[in-house]
Amino acid sequence: MSIEILFITLILIHIILNILFTFAILKRNLYTAFQNCLYISVVWLLPIIGLIWMWIILTSYKEKGEVDNSNALSGPDFLD
């Protein structure tokens, strides 16, 4: 459960930062139209590729049953 909440939070942060960066690129007149399109496409494609990669990794661990979030925030056993 906590991994999903973290995952959703990271997705929302990336979307907000991508929108802000897209507006920052469009606001400046330092680049040509081609460079603007290229920078904006890179800004949106890299996180999407990373998102797909993370989703594949998380689903493969869940299918194997290796993810156990029951003690995610409890800390090491020797401290008990």
Image: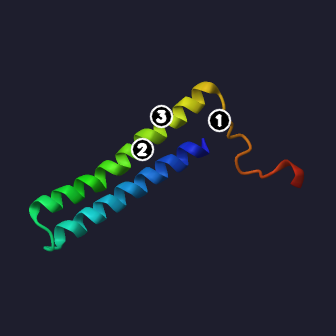
Vertical relation: 31 (above or below) 61: below
The crowd level at tag 3 (other Cα within 10 Å; few <14, some 14-19, many 20+) is few
Q: Earlier in the sequence, mark 1 or mark 2?
A: 2
Q: CA distance from mark 3 to mark 1?
A: 14 Å
Q: CA distance from mark 3 to mark 2?
A: 9 Å
Vertical relation: 65 (above or below) 68: above
Considering the numbered disc 1 on the image, is that residue within a helix, a strand or a loop?
loop
Q: Residue, x 54% and y 47% (percent of image)?
A: 5
**x and y percentages locating residue 17 in the rendered image:** 36, 62
Residue 62, by quadrant, is: top right
Instruction: Give amino acid for label 3.
Output: Ile
Considering the numbered disc 2 on the image, is that residue within a helix, a strand or a loop?
helix
Q: Residue, x 37% and y 50% (percent of image)?
A: 47
**x and y percentages locating residue 52 in the rendered image:** 41, 39
- Residue 51 lies left or right of residue 71; in this view the side is left
Q: Is residue 48 visible?
A: yes
Q: Where does label 1 land, which residue? A: 67
Q: Where does label 3 land, which residue? A: 56
Q: Earlier in the sequence, mark 3 or mark 1?
A: 3
Instruction: Give amino acid for label 1.
Output: Val
Q: Which quadrant is home to the N terminus?
A: top right
The crowd level at tag 1 (other Cα within 10 Å; few <14, some 14-19, many 20+) is some
Q: Earlier in the sequence, mark 3 or mark 2?
A: 2
Instruction: Give amino acid for label 2.
Output: Leu
Q: Residue, x 52% and y 36% (percent of image)?
A: 57
Q: CA distance from mark 1 to mark 2?
A: 18 Å
- Residue 19 lies left or right of residue 73; in this view the side is left
In depth, the one of 25 and 74 nearer the eye is 25
**x and y percentages locating residue 53 in the rendered image:** 44, 40
Q: Looking at the rendered structure, which numbered label has been put on residue 51? A: 2
In depth, the one of 16 and 49 nearer the eye is 49
Considering the numbered disc 3 on the image, is that residue within a helix, a strand or a loop?
helix
